[in-house]
Amino acid sequence: MQPSQDRSQPRSQEGSRERTRERSSDNAVNDRSRPGRSPVVRAESGAPEGRQEPLPGPIARAEGFEGLGLGEPLLRAVADKGYTHPSPIQSQCIPAVISGRDVMAAAQTGTGKTAGFTLPMLERLRHGPRARNNVVRSLVLTPTRELAAQVAESVRAYGRYLDLRSEVVFGGVKINPQMMRLRGGADVLVATPGRLMDLQQQRAIRLDRVEILVLDEADRMLDMGFIRDIRKILALLPEKRQNLLFSATFSPEIRKLTAGLLHQPLQLQASPENQAAPTVEHLMHPCDMATKGDLLSHLIRSNDWQQVLVFSRTKHGANRLADRLEKEGLKAAAIHGNKSQGARTRALAGFKSGEVQVLVATDIAARGIDIHQLPHVVNLDLPNVAEDYVHRIGRTGRAGHAGHAVSLVAAEEHELLRAIERLIGHPLPREVVPGFEPRILSAPPLDLSGGRNRPPRQGGGGGGGGRNRNAAGSRSGGGGGGSARSGPPNGLPRRRTAG
Ligand code: AMP
């Protein structure tokens, strides 16, 4: 799939080309393991309630991608990517979406969910009339810029043999070029909610012809305070459309949102909720708050870690750590909501290419970071919300590869640690690093109120929140704790930084 400027072929010609290639695909490609933490996908039909659909048995997967209903141009693109077998979520989702059903899937990054919705969406779109005049035919909403860019990249890769137009829009960059690009419409538009609303208000897009809506990482969009934008967007869409919703967890808020949104959805669960990949080795090093930086650089050097993703609770902490590591001669970069989009993209590209050895991220900014075989994830600070531990370490141990998740835990974080251990169902193995034995063995817990319980002016800030984020007192992801503040002094919700 090409962006609008370079549509490759006249439509009629492309159509006949697609048809003649139909069913002639050869998927014999390099043998790469498929993603999907659990070999089991549970499926439930929305109608009648609770009815069980057949489980994806080994036969469905042994067939590879053929037989799922994808046409030749998509099978060829999948083969180009090197995928030989659909992941469990893909083998369930693809036929359901092609058949026009609504889908609601509990699926985290790493399960292959992006291809799970993109491939069948493109399959449906390629049979309809192309977008024109600001019309959007399918809309994928994501919580963060990084995820939007990544989904758009997948759409381009899977749609490379199709004559469909895809665009991606997010905040933090100029709106005018986006408005220009959208003039001709988009068969697929990937967007963060805030920028999409801005574009809509400026009449740069028409949403009344949307055929397919995808809410990706819906739980995170709600956490980031995008619910009002989402509701406004929903009101602009035609009533008759297909809806696909992906979420790591199904909180009561998500269920409330889905109630009026989805029509008899097929319900899928790609991996048991809140379970980490079995290939991840967890380890926790007790230490003091004050020695965490030293301990981290000691671990990186003594173990010769070449590619480490480090999670910091606050933006300020992320900056401080990256600066400090740089001064020590390690190639490090920070990525969070206060960084410009250019800086975030550069840091991520550098990390992916191996040029940046240590990437320090807040939870929100790290959403959508997808790096094959990321070997080490370090929690410099434990996350405020236990589920985020699973999201964080979901960056390693992907697609069956071994991963290594290390947490540096001070006495102030013992409550957070207990919550994480309760959630994942086992204690984290403890290992004291000689020279970094904790001196403080018990301490009051951290203030995770996002700053509301503390005097103002602590510097730093939260972890890249969205509209109204923290104002509702909900999960605070990469913000909160430490030096986070919940909003500007006038008490208005903080302006989003992600979309
Ligand atoms: P996602 O869960 O969509 O973020 O995908 C996780 C990673 O798995 C991405 O890097 C995909 O490129 C990769 N992937 C998706 N589907 C497959 C597949 N069937 N076989 C191998 N890798 C895949």
Image (cartoon, grey):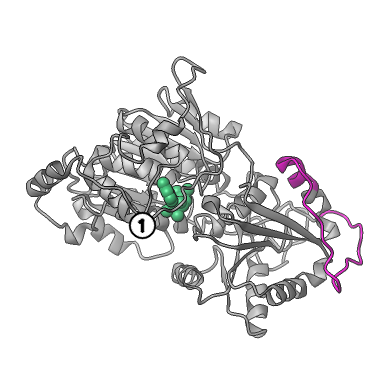
| Residue identifier under label 1 | 153
Q: Is residue 467 magenta?
A: no
Q: Which residue is depicted at the point 13% across and 41% down?
A: 19
Q: Nearer the viewer, residue 445 or 105?
A: 105
Q: Horizontally, is 151 left or right of 66 in the view?
A: right
Q: x and y percent of residue 358 in the render?
A: 60, 72
Identify the residue at image location x=65%, y=44%: 474
Query: Which residue is nearer to you in this view: 396 or 457?
Result: 396
Q: Main secondary structure of the magenta part?
A: loop
Q: Residue 387 falls in which quadrant of the image?
A: top right
Q: Amino acid at mark 1?
A: Glu
Tag 1's secondary structure? helix
How packed is label 1: few (under 14 Cα within 10 Å), some, or many (20 or more)? some
Looking at the image, residue 14 sits to the left or right of residue 250; the answer is left
The quadrant holding residue 349 is bottom left
- Bounds of the magenta segment: 418-445
